Image (tube, coloured by chain):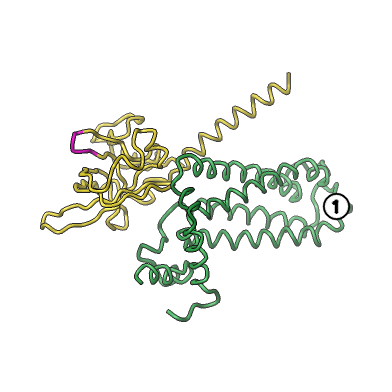
Chain colours: A yellow, B green
Amino acid sequence: MTAVKRIFGATALGALTLMGVQASAHHAFGAEFDPNRPLLIKGPVVKIEWTNPHAWFHVEHTNEDGSKTVWMMEAGTPNTLLRRGIHRNSVPVGTEVVIDGYQSKDLSNRGNGRNMTFANGQTLFMGSSGTGAPRDGADPTEPSRPAEAKPADEDEEAGD
Amino acid sequence: MNDTGPYNPSLIHDFALWIDSHAWSTALHESLWVYPLVESTHVLTLMLFVGMLAMVDLRMLGLAFRHTPVSEMTSRILPWSVAGFVIMVLTGVLLFYAIPVRTAHSIWFRVKVILLIVAAINAWWFHRRVSRDRERWDSQPKPPLNVRLTAAMSLATWSGVIIAGRMIAYNWFDCDRPQSAFVTWAAGCAVELQAEAG
């Protein structure tokens, strides 16, 4: 009987550990991205890096003055995106998308993607869950919060 | 930049590029299941390895299991530790294999490798010198100073390895961002940026 108990204990411990690992597979949002710098990037996808631990969508955005800037938008893992319904050939280069997200703290042309919206109106949550990103309602697994919630709350979420 | 200092960054860069040219490296980097499994296994087995090792270290520091002979601790615990170590190293190599260029130019990864070398020298020193007269202190609740020092060194270096390894995930000191002269030198950024520009 003790052996059974021991195995059960080990399994429970293993499950808890795995949950911890899953959370730490993503880096904390606050370390690299600024919740106070929201982005809205519109334009054709020019390149996709289908890589671990994060996929990157390169989108050519047309600025107000007509110039073009390529933004690199971070997404979840290839596995996460597959489970949400897209694979490496779902978004061919040239697809027009709208990505909202948050700019990186170093103010480079890089951001953390939240929702990707396609021309037909379909929306995909492209980001990662449990990273401490603002609760803007993009992540369906996370209860959204009223906009007036104080921004300081976002830091306590740092998932690792 | 011709003055490359005490190490040759372009040699490391070329090695990373060579790995990067392997189809299997790309496949692992882009894999749906294998990369996350390898990464999780790396973390789980490092817990097994360092967790078990920490128990032996705490015993040798005289802080835990003070009335259990050290030899009994090592004979019962170390096989687990060795198993964890082997899988941890294999999965660690695979993680590097998947993302060779960025990792080779990561200052955290470089700190980690240095700490791994220090940990290895410490372990070698322990087996070579410190453990020679183990019969004398095997049952002492608080072993002599040189034993405690090696145990403390082991705990410190492996803690450092884990912290540095965890930090590899963050891009603060990546070469594709503006960096201080020190980081540019220590991470071999000049070589990477030069290669990208050329």
Query: Is A121 drawn above or below residue A67 in the view shown?
Result: above
Instruction: Say what amino acid the circle numbered 1 marks.
Output: Trp
User: Residue A134 location, x and y as percent?
Assistant: 31, 40
Q: Residue at x 85, y 54 (%)?
A: B134
Q: Residue at x 46, y 52 (%)?
A: B26
Q: Residue at x 24, y 43 (%)?
A: A100
Magenta segment, which residues? A117-121
Q: Quadrant of the C terminus of chain B?
A: bottom left
Total residue callouts: 1
User: Residue B136 location, x and y as percent?
Assistant: 89, 54
User: Residue B72 location, x and y as percent?
Assistant: 82, 42
- The image quadrant of residue B184 is bottom left
Residue indicated by mark 1: B137
Q: Residue at x 45, y 40 (%)?
A: B32
A32 and B92: which is toward the camera: B92
Residue B14 within the magenta-colored segment of the rendering: no
User: Residue A144 location, x and y as percent?
Assistant: 30, 31
Residue most toward the top?
A: A1
Label 1 chain ID: B
Residue most toward the right?
A: B135
Q: Quadrant of the N terminus of chain B?
A: bottom left
Q: Main secondary structure of the magenta part?
A: loop
Residue most toward the bottom?
A: B2
B45 and B30: which is toward the camera: B30
Query: Is A28 drawn above or below residue B151 in the view shown?
Result: above
